[in-house]
Image (spheres, coloured by chain):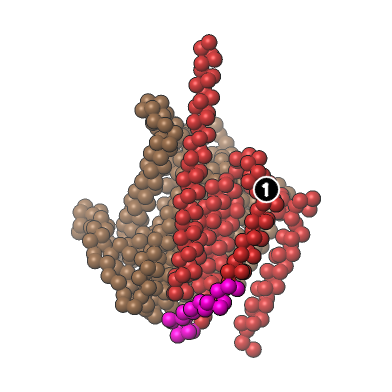
Amino acid sequence: MAVLRWKSVNSIQEQNKEDFINMANLIVFAILAVVILGSAVMCVTTTRIMRAATFLLFVLFGVAGLYFLLDYTFLGAAQISIYAGGVTMIYIFAIQLVSKRTLQGLTERVKPGRFVSYALITLIGLVTVIGVFLKNKFIDMSAQMADVEVPMKTVGTALMGSEKYQYVLPFEFISVFLLACIIGGIVISRKE
Amino acid sequence: MFDFSLITTWFDSLLRDTLGLGDFLSILIECVLVGVIILAAYAIIAIVLIFMERKVCAYFQCRLGPMRVGFWGLLQVPADVLKMLIKEIFFVDKADKLLYMIAPFLVLIGSVGAFAFLPWNKGAAVLDFNVGIFLLTAISSIGVVGVFLAGWSSNNKYSLVSAMRGAVQMISYEMSLCLCLISAVVLTGTMQLSGIVEAQGDAFGWLIFKGHIPAIIALVVFLIAGNAEANRGPFDLPEAESELTAGYHTEYSGMGFGYFYLAEYLNLFIIAGVAATVFLGGWMPLHIGVAQVDTVLDYIPGFFWFCGKTFLLVWILLWIKWTYPRLRIDQILKLEWKYLMPLALLNLVLMTVVAALGLHF
């Protein structure tokens, strides 16, 4: 009898714990979503290009936060290192190379005639995303996944292995491609 | 060996069982407490480092340094901090005020984020992911954006020149910094900081003993690149005061400047701390293979080992700073791209060969 009662208490505690984790995940997700959406809207609506780059940085941080929430720390770290340390800095450098006068007071009004085409493009994009989302059943798949951190060894062997579902060929292809980009950049920037 | 997780588990059970708080409240209290402790430690270490810098620099130049405020000048830095806290914060005309406000915080986020990764003792690591080292370098790279935005939003040409220099220098030196850490990861086989420390527990198991030549090269390159990454020492030309007044933080006053100052000193500490953790064993005591001696050394808590190693490296970095003259920008970039990075790449190959053939101790 006592054992039975202890068990039931235990299972209630387990249930509470699971509820709590879901609850905490939901709260963190809501905070991240507000940060991402708010920064994204600010990024598009601001008229100063440097501010737009900064808000873009916050959007990218928020996305990295989502990866951490999903326990995929490797992708989160890659997101921070590549987008914060790399891409945003390259945007900022590119902005610096543009003449200051062309950037000041640069605004563009949306004409009503073009509004329809913008709306159409947005709609096509939305339909594509929803289609991919429904076809792949991401939510069902993620519900089946175990809620654990992916070990670094798994990620590493998947990236560098040559078996089925392993990615050494794309990896090498991208590295050669990046090398070609670097050489191209040097060729363009050379004076003679 | 003193295990800090005794204290954390005791505190956890105190909240959960003795006080009967639920999961939500106890985790919330623990998170807030850990955050407060990190920030407090951050500020206190900054004060210690600033005092150390002034005294060490003075003795290298045959001076006495601050002597008048308090015994042996001990109250000088708290007095400076107080002054900085009560200074007025002003804005520059026609500057982008939002970015001007955000920039010091971005620098601080990168620095505090990296600081939270340092393992202080056995069981006293705040952030300990399985991608630890990678995430550490990723978070510390946020600081570059902050430095650049600070210079840009100050609406001052000297600040902008300095910010450009700082960003170029920090991005460049990040390369060899990360390559050196990767060569350490190759040898230990893990990216988790606690795992790296655990891997150095054998007799003479610290990485510079275990990995001999490639590890020593990696440590030296790491310290040089780290010094440049923290904008210090002979590489402090973003703040070259003879050419650029005070660099990217010229237009900041009060705590705005204070944050940059804090971050600079803490970056120095983080570089030294990461070098101590990865190459000198972190909190792991020196084991020499004789059981009695090892037991005696184990009685010294890991906290003291970590701080001792870190402050030793800080002292070496200060020594370098006050010994060598400042480099020019082209010399700095040449040093990185023509010498340090190829050296780090070759060293990575060498380390991989050593690890693959089992040539280490």
Give the extent of the magenta segment: A99-117
Horizontal side of residue B89 vs A119, given as left or right: left
Tell me, by letter, which chain the rendering colours red: A
Q: Which residue is mark 1?
A: A137
Depth check, front residue: B157 or B232: B157
Q: Is residue B293 visible?
A: no
Give percent across and percent down for residue B173: 53, 66
Where residue A172 appears, as percent x and y from the top left, is 74, 62
Q: Position of residue A6 (x, y in %)?
A: 51, 17
Residue B351 location (% of width, % of height): 66, 55
Looking at the rendered structure, the kind of residue marked 1 is: Lys
Which residue is nearer to you in this view: B5 or B332?
Answer: B5
Residue sitting at x 49%, y 69%: A44
Which residue appears at 31% of the width and 75% of the height?
A: B92
Q: Which chain is brown?
A: B
Label 1: element kind: loop
- Rendered position, B38 above or below B146: above
Q: State the residue lying farthest toward the top.
A: A1
